[in-house]
Amino acid sequence: ADLDDDYLPGLVSAPFFPKEKREGWWLVVGDTKTNLLLSIKRVPLQLKQNILMEFMAPEEAGDYNLTLFCMSDSYMGCDQEYSLPLNVAAAKSDDEMEGSEEEDEGSEE
């Protein structure tokens, strides 16, 4: 059977839930070393989807090992976690920013 990307799975077996329940997932980005939560989003279960999760990068430049947690809101035992390496580059100073803007303006001629 051909299933399109908008396919939604059937209902969850939840006899004590007050209404129909479809499976969803909580996506959580965090730093387990500092116990810091950076982003959280709830998404419905689909065969395939692209998710954009935004968060503030750490203030200090360097390499970080974040974790993406995928947690089912309906079933126990199927949670997953994935390593999410992140490289934060050093920010440019205000002087460097002004200098690069002047160079850009001069190169337009």
Image (cartoon, rainbow, N blue to C red):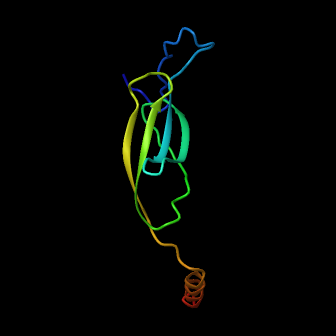
Residue that protrudes farthest toward the front in the picture: 34
Residue that protrudes farthest toward the top in the picture: 15
Figure disc tally: 0
Which residue is located at x 48 percent, y 46 percent?
Answer: 29
Left or right, residue 16 beside residue 75: right
Which residue is located at x 38 percent, y 24 percent?
Answer: 77
> The C terminus is located in which quarter?
bottom right
Q: Is residue 66 above or below residue 21?
A: below
Which residue is located at x 49 percent, y 39 percent?
Answer: 27
Which residue is located at x 53 percent, y 21 percent?
Answer: 22
Q: Is residue 89 above or below residue 79?
A: below
> The N terminus is located in which quarter?
top left
Give how far across and how far down residue 73 sits, in percent.
51, 26
Relative depth, front residue between 40 and 53: 40
Q: Is residue 97 above or below residue 13?
A: below
Give how far across and how far down residue 96 sits, in percent.
55, 83
Left or right, residue 56 beside residue 81: right
Give how far across and how far down residue 47 sits, in percent.
42, 31
Give how far across and how far down residue 80 sits, in percent.
38, 35
